[in-house]
């Protein structure tokens, strides 16, 4: 039973991360590419990146969502944060 519950949790997490990636890619990449000379993910990997904590990442995603004029639900915003954290920040 524990194995089944663990597998279910991992499946939901993988789905949420995939949804976060899709939201990010559809709504963020164009602006990020324009800011970085066509290398949008470099915002996350550069040495002088501004995000230094999970709280900071949450705030940055919220501010970017406003700037991009996207109407994400809190759950969608969390999916984007979780995706970015899992792929780039690892807080």
Image: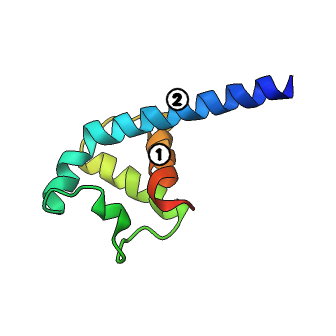
Residue 83: which disc? Answer: 1
Quarter-wise, where is residue 90 in the image? bottom right
Residue 15: which disc? Answer: 2
Q: Quadrant of the C terminus?
A: bottom right
Q: Where is residue 86 in the image (x, y as percent from the top left)?
A: 52, 51
Instruction: Locate residue 71 relative to residue 1 in the image: left or right.
Output: left
Q: Which secondary structure lies at badge 2? A: helix
Name the residue located 43 percent from the left edge and 67 percent from the top edge. Answer: 51
Residue 76 position (above or below residue 88): above
Near mark 1 (Cα within 10 A), the count class, few <14, some 14-19 or many ≥20, is many
Q: Position of residue 1 (x, y in %)?
A: 86, 22
For marks 2 and 1 on the same chain, the one whose residue lies earlier in the sequence = 2
Q: Which secondary structure lies at badge 1? A: helix
User: Disc 2, disc 1: CB below 8 Å?
Assistant: no
Near mark 2 (Cα within 10 A), the count class, few <14, some 14-19 or many ≥20, is few
* Colour mode of the rendering: rainbow
Instruction: Locate residue 85 relative to residue 61 in the image: left or right.
Output: right
Residue 29 position (above or below residue 42): above
């Amino acid at each position: 039973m524990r194995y089944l519950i663990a597998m279910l949790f991992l499946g939901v997490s993988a789905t949420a991360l995939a949804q976060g990636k899709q939201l990010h890619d559809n709504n963020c990449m164009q602006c990020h590419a324009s800011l970085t000379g066509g290398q949008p993910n470099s915002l996350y990997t550069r040495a002088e990146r501004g995000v230094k904590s999970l709280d900071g990442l949450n705030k940055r995603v919220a501010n970017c969502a406003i700037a991009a004029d996207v109407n994400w639900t809190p759950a969608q915003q969390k999916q984007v944060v979780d995706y970015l954290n899992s792929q780039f920040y690892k807080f």
